[in-house]
């Protein structure tokens, strides 16, 4: 619900959550919900850096050290994203490097006990790549 | 009636990583906002519903140290963990069983369940609940209420099964007088125009099913050219707050096993701004309810206020009302 912004349960991008890597960026993201959820109920929506939308095939989801393509997340019914943990979006992009960047991430949640609800959390932050 | 805290009220303190689960237990004790302690399994416990022996031992040690009383473990009816496919009854029974075992292992006398479980699934879980000595409490939350068709189905099942292990958990959101003014203030601060708020409130106060009223509101708001994000945000008032008479709980009272003392903010006199506690608390007390009520602040959805302080104020209000009414 991007219309209830700025609360813990709608934050997606962590403060100081951007790291430059040799092939792009690593973005630290939080689950914008009050409780843990199976990865299958989380969908990574649009990711953009400095206004450029990243192709979803160039984004990888990392949780507890394991990575998966965004498309494979829907099948991970037994993998739980614990609500206190960060996950990471590993973004492959040619235009990368340190300095300040505007990062935007949308996460769509489908809370599994509320049928038909798609909860959209869109977060945008200006971050210094570490 | 005894008081306590649900850690759900402290969601912001917890998610910000300023307070760990153990810190929240210590704070609840230090601030005197126990002794009742309610926990949301999937919020507080890594690996839930699996409870390791180590976690159970540590939890019991902390509860003893802080003189807290486990009251209710909130469990979830996650019927659609695979998107687009709803679990069968067999799968739902299997999904609930370890959560009820978790409640028993941690010493919670009540497992709060959700209506999405379905009456048949809960009926099938009664033998396990009896064996483990855990009562199953259906949380009745807005937009549902004591006489809502979804709840009536459970009432019919309860009447047939007649087990003392089947009960209710009233959440005061079903019986609000109005929408919390602090919530409307939040929308004003976001730039939502007064005309849209007036339209929403006019329809909120009208009669009828919550979802029908919400659809009616959305249609009218769209027709008036309201901003889509703003009108959707404000539409939350329909599922979040119901305006049933507090006395609607009376018929369920003998089987009430726990209460969610839902609250949002306070008026100048220190009373809850939207929920009629002076009507509600004596009704449960005089009806013979001797269990626990969790202070359940949900203002954390839209406010960064100090939840510890909110809970202290809530319990001070409840004690005052119980002493004077």
Image (cartoon, helix red, strand yellow):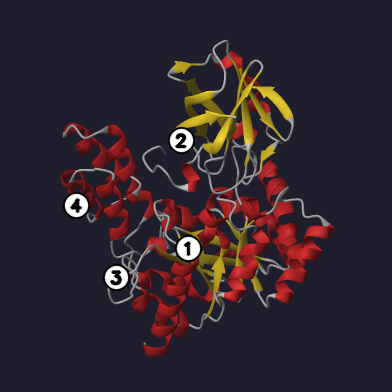
- Closest to the observer: B244 or B319? B319
Kind of element beneath mark 3: loop
Q: Chain of mark 4?
A: B
Q: Residues within 10 Å of mark 4 (few under 14, many from 20)?
A: few
Name which residue lies at 25% across and 33% down.
B227
Mark 4 vs mark 1: tell me if same chain.
yes
Query: How far is disc 4 from disc 1 in space, using C-alphas?
Result: 30 Å
Query: How far is disc 1 from disc 3 in space, using C-alphas?
Result: 17 Å
The residue that label 2 is drawn on is A121
Residue A105 in picture, x, y percent from top left: 49, 28
Residue A97 in picture, x, y percent from top left: 57, 18
As drawn, the label of residue B282 is: none
The residue that label 4 is drawn on is B202
Name which residue lies at 67% across and 29% down.
A62
Q: Is residue B166 above or below residue A74?
A: below
Marked residue nearer the N-terminal end (4 or 1): 4
Marked residue nearer the N-terminal end (4 or 3): 4
């Amino acid at each position: 619900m991007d219309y209830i912004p700025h609360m813990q349960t709608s934050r997606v991008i962590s403060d100081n959550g951007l790291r430059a890597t040799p092939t792009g960026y690593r973005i630290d993201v939080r689950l914008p919900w009050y409780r843990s959820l199976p990865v299958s109920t989380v969908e990574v929506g649009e990711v953009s850096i400095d206004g450029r939308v990243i192709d979803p095939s160039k984004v990888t989801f990392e949780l507890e050290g394991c990575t998966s393509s965004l498309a494979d997340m829907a099948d991970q019914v037994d993998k739980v994203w614990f609500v206190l943990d960060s996950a990471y979006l590993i973004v492959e992009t040619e235009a990368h490097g340190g300095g300040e960047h505007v990062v935007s991430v949308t996460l769509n949640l489908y809370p599994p006990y509320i049928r038909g609800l798609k909860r959209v959390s869109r977060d945008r932050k200006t971050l210094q790549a570490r | 009636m005894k008081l306590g805290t649900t850690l759900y009220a402290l969601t912001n303190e917890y998610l910000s990583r300023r307070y760990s689960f153990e810190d929240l237990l210590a704070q609840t004790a230090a601030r005197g906002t126990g002794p009742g302690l309610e926990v949301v399994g999937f919020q507080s416990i890594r690996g839930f519903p699996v409870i390791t022996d180590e976690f159970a031992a540590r939890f019991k040690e902390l509860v003893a140290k802080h003189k807290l009383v486990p009251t209710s473990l909130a469990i979830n009816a996650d019927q659609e963990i695979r998107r687009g496919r709803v679990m069968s009854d067999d799968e739902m029974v299997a999904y609930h069983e370890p959560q009820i075992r978790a409640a028993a292992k941690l010493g919670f006398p009540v497992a709060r369940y959700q209506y999405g479980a379905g009456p048949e699934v809960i009926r099938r879980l009664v033998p396990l609940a009896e064996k483990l000595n855990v009562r199953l409490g259906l949380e009745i939350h807005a937009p549902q209420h004591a006489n809502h068709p979804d709840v009536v189905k459970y009432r019919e099942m309860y009447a047939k099964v007649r087990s003392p292990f089947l009960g209710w958990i009233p959440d005061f959101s079903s019986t609000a007088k109005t929408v919390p003014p602090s919530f409307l203030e939040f929308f004003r601060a976001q730039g939502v125009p007064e005309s849209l708020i007036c339209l929403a409130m006019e329809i909120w106060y009208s009669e009828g099913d919550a979802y029908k009223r919400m659809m009616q509101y959305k249609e009218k708001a769209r027709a008036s050219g309201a901003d889509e994000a703003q009108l959707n945000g404000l539409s939350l008032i329909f599922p979040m707050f119901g305006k049933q008479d507090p006395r609607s709980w009376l018929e369920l009272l003998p089987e009430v096993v726990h209460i969610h003392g839902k609250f949002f903010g306070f008026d100048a006199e220190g009373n809850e701004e939207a929920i009629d506690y002076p009507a509600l608390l004596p009704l449960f007390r005089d009806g013979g309810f001797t269990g626990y009520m969790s202070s359940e602040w949900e203002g954390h959805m839209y406010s960064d206020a100090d939840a510890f302080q909110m809970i202290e104020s809530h319990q001070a209000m409840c004690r005052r009302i119980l002493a004077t009414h």
